[in-house]
Image (spheres, helix red, strand yellow):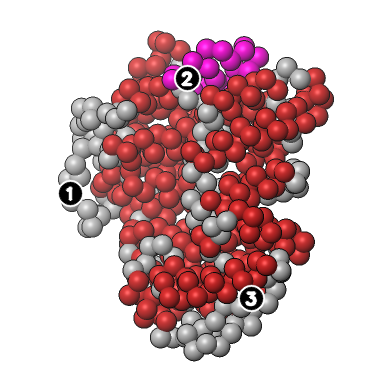
Amino acid sequence: MPESKNIDKALTDHSSANPETAGVLHLFGDLEQRLLEGAGLEGAEELASGIIRAGLLVRGAAEQQAIKELPDPLPPQWVLPELHSIFREALLRDFQELPLEFAWLLRMVRWPLPANLLPEFMFQLGQKPEFAAELVPVLGPRGQALAAAWEEFALYREARWAQPLSFRNKEQRKWAFRLWRLKDPSAALRYAWSNSGSLREADREHIFETLLFKVPVEDWIALRDLGGGSQGLQQQCWVRAACLHFPEYGEEAKERFLLCAGSGDWSSFRFVADSGKRYRWKPERMVQTVPPQWFEDEPVAQAYFCWVHQRGWVREFLSSLQASGKAPVRVWYFKWLLSQGLLSGGFPTDLLTNGIPFAEITPCLEQWLDCCGEKIDLEAFLRASGHHQHFWSDGVCRRILALNESERVHRYFDLEAFWQRLPFKINPASPVVAEIPEECRMVMGHVLHFDSVIRTRRRMREILPLKN
């Protein structure tokens, strides 16, 4: 790790160190305009010093909060002023891919975020809890200090995860549960089970779904004695866990389910409790509960797709797929939708691809581009390929660039959104980078443009001891 700056010599007598300070964002106010306008070569060193000094003031303010849970003095945490301006502009302009990729790379080598980037990253990504969750493993001691000192960063604080209903924001409640189950899944399950009535049904579904693969079998066995609960959602949660953790239950239910394949109608299928009593759910709840791993045969899966679409239960089926990214049924479903011409702007393609591993989604995207050519619905394609965990292979990039030559494509679609995302999605070491036409090298801000993003992504990899 690069040598850490001695940022423990914080200016604690500065007014920002007052415990009554409302927040930390004002510390960067005098830098914001210069960051957006650019400081030029002469002012770069002064600007970098200002950024580090702002970080020092944050540290000084945090020390005044008497944080008892953390060692004092806190260990050093490295700084990276050279990339501060481009990260800041990427965050301000809603290009979260760049900071999220940096957090992902840091997690691979077990490094914390640089101290001078912490307030920016924590505040901007904290606006969307699913992005905030990506930062938790790389906060380091100083990030934990900020989380403990300021309410605006409370979602990052481990002690608060055990009190998820204390958050006012419903999205924060949901993600506090998710973070807590990563740290203590058994406790999170008990809390979720006993407090499910205090949550919206959509939130309860998300919470129980994230617990399925993390909670030990013995905890589910304890819940089995409760008969799966009296409410439909609790029954659904228990059934999903039983199918996953109790082989006898899961195999018996799977066998009954697949017996319906002969008729192509699954309306008569029911899940049962331990007592043998059949749950009287609406069919769409059953569709939402069937494990994706049950489909081992593509023709049977295709018959099920037809049945689901005929009855309009597409979103319920997509919900059942979210719990598992690796089940082959997801790729089969993608190919079936493509063959039926259903991959259009009206279909939730973002839900279809969310969670599919990169190695599996790449051939699907390439096949989509090959099959549809210039007639492809690019709005649907952009939503499907836009997840921050997915990058674009050389094949995908070349196919998108080929569409730029089509007059028909330009008549119906504005490709600017693709050129804005291209530097974040392309492999920064790819030979395709040199082939990108000048008109596709978009400028997104004062500092942010195609070449600066590629340079930054390369620099991120040079700094870190990544293995090939």
Q: Residues within 10 Å of mark 1 (few under 14, many from 20)?
A: few
Residue found 57% across the figure and 78% down from its top: 271
Instruction: Tell which of 190 and 364 is nearer to you.
Output: 364
What separation in Å lies between label 3 and label 2 (alpha carbons)? 50 Å
Query: Would residue 293 be seen by someone viewing this image from the given angle?
Result: yes
Give left or right: position of 182 versus 350.
left
- Please identify the quadrant where the C terminus is shown: top left
Image coords of residue 311 (percent x, y): 76, 65
Could you tell me the amino acid type at mark 2? Ser
Residue found 64% across the figure and 78% down from its top: 281
Could you tell me the amino acid type at mark 1? Asp
Give left or right: position of 402 versus 144.
right
What separation in Å lies between label 3 and label 1 (alpha carbons)? 60 Å
Query: Would residue 351 be seen by someone viewing this image from the given angle?
Result: no
Could you tell me the amino acid type at mark 3? Phe
Question: Circle 1 — which element?
Answer: loop
Question: Circle 2 — which element?
Answer: loop
Instruction: Tell which of 320 and 122 is nearer to you.
Output: 320
Image coords of residue 248 (percent x, y): 43, 75
Q: Earlier in the sequence, mark 3 or mark 1?
A: 1
Residue range highlighted in magenta: 429-456
Disc 3, disc 2: CB below 8 Å? no
Instruction: Tell which of 383 and 139 is nearer to you.
Output: 383
Q: Which residue is mark 3?
A: 269
Residue found 71% across the figure and 66% down from its top: 264
Q: Which residue is mark 2?
A: 430
The quadrant holding residue 140 is top left
